[in-house]
Image (tube, helix red, strand yellow):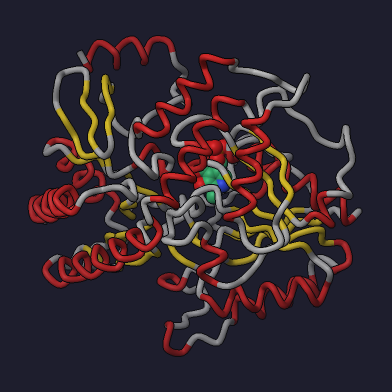
Amino acid sequence: MNSQVVARSNSVFTPAFHTYHSIAIQRGEGCQILDQDGKSYLDCASGLAVLNIGHNHPRVMERVSQQMANFVHTGGVFLNEVTVEAAELLTTITPTGMDMLFFSNSGAEAVEGAIKLARHVTGRQGIIAFSGAFHGRTLGALSLTSSNCRYRERYPPLLPSVYHAPYPFCHHCLFGCRTSNCTLTCLNYLEDMLRHSITPTEVAAIIIEPILGEGGYSPAPSPFLTGLRQLCDKYGILLIFDEVQSGMGRSGEWFAAQGYDVTPDILTVAKGIASGFPLSAVVSRRELMEKWPTWAHGTTFGGNPVSCAAAIATMETIRDRHLLPRCRQLGNTTMERLRALQKQHPLISDVRGRGLMIGIELTQPDGTPASAACDRILHECLEHGLIIINCGAERNIIRFIPPLTISDVELDQALRIMGEALESVL
Ligand SMILES: Cc1ncc(COP(=O)(O)O)c(C=O)c1O
C-alpha cells in the first residue's frame, strides 16, 4: 500500500529527503509505472530527466544482468573493459575534440570535478556562474547553484571567488528585452563584471546550463552562447557546459552544445547516461585532461562496471533506434500542441524548450506566478494517471520530460490529461 510506505518513509527519512509525489512504485516499464496500490501511471518526469529510454529497457536489463554475473565493482584497484568501452563510446557522441574523461557517480560530483579541473589546469581561482542555475547540492556545486535561495540558506560560507551573472532567461529578461529587440545586454553585463568585479586573468571558468533546467526550463538564446564562447576565448577562460539535465539526447541532440554549434572546454554529463544507474562524467579535450595529474582527483565508485554496462546499452539504444530525430520531431509537435492549448488557457504564459525538455509556465492574470494552480494541476494529473513535475524558484513551471521512447498514443494521453487538468483549475 502506498500509504504504508509513505508512513514508514516519513518515520525513517529526514524531511530533506523528499519526493515530488507521495506514491510508491512497484514496477516500471517504458513510460508506464505501477504503484503499490495497483494504479498505473504514465511517467512524464522520467525520474528527473534520467530515464531517457524509459524504465527497465530490455537492452539495458540484459546488459546489466550479464555484467552482474561477472563482477560488480572494481573501485580504483584494477581496470575492467566495460568501463573503458563505456568511456570510448561516450567520446564518440560528445562534441568534437572532447575525447578524454573522468567517471564519477552523480551530477554534483561531475560539477565538482569540472571546477577542480578548471582551477587545476588554469591555476586561477574565480568561477562565474549564472543566477537561476542549478549545479547540485554538494558545497562546491552549491556555491554555483542559485536557482532558489532555500537551497543555500544557512550553508555559507560557500566557495569563495564565485560570481553570478544574470542567466539569459528571455521570458523574464532582466533588461526588459524581447526576442525581437534583444541587444544581448546580459552578455555586456557579464563583460562589465570582468571590468568591475573580477579581473579576467583570475577567472578559471564560466559555467552555464545551455538549457536552464531546475531554474525554469529555458533555453539560452543562440547568440548568447556564441558570444560567451568568444568572450572566454578572448580572456583565456574555460567554458563549462553543465549538461547533466540537457544531455544524453534530451534536447534532440546528444548534447545541447551540438544543437547550438558551440563547443565548451569542459562538459558535465550525468542523469540520462545510464538509464537510472548512477554514473556521471567530466569530459574535456585531451590537451586539458592530460594536465590533470594522477592523485589530483579520485573516486571509489565512479565508473562502476554495472552502471557502465547500462550506459553502453543506453547509448546504443538511442543511436540504433534513431531517438534523436524522433525526440526533435516529438518535441516540435508537442510544443505546437501546447501552444494551441495556451490559446484556450490564459494561465499558460509561455511554452518553450528544445526536444523533449519542455517548460510550460503558468501565470495569474495579474502577472504573478501561478504556483498554487501549478500544484493543483500536478495533483490533478497524478489523480488521472499522469506523472509530471514542476520547477522554477516559484514552482510555477511544469517540466514536461517524457522518455524519448514515448509512443504517439501515450503522448496523446499525456497531453489530454494535462489539458483536462488545466480546465479543472480555471
Ligand atoms: C544541470 C544540473 N547540474 C547538476 C545537477 C546535480 O545532479 P545530481 O542531483 O545527480 O547531483 C542537476 C540535477 O538536477 C542538474 O540539473
Q: Where is residue 298 shown, x and y percent of the image?
A: 78, 31
- Occupied quadrant, residue 276: top left
Q: Name which residue lies at 19% across and 66% down.
A: 337
Given residues 402 and 185, the one toward you in this image is 402
Given residues 98 and 240, the one toward you in this image is 98
Given residues 396 and 278, the one toward you in this image is 278
Q: Is residue 409 visible?
A: yes
Residue 196 located left or right of residue 365: right
Q: Check the image and report above or below for 31 versus 240.
A: above
Q: Where is residue 179 shown, x and y percent of the image?
A: 43, 83
Q: Name which residue lies at 23% across and 70% down.
A: 336
Q: Where is residue 426 shown, x and y percent of the image?
A: 11, 57
Residue 9 located left or right of residue 279: left
Q: Is residue 150 visible?
A: no
Q: Name which residue lies at 8% across and 55% down.
A: 423
Q: Check the image and report above or below for 373 versus 169.
A: above
Q: Name which residue lies at 40% across and 27% down.
A: 61
Q: Which quadrant, please, contains the N terminus?
A: top left
Residue 324 located left or right of residue 382: right
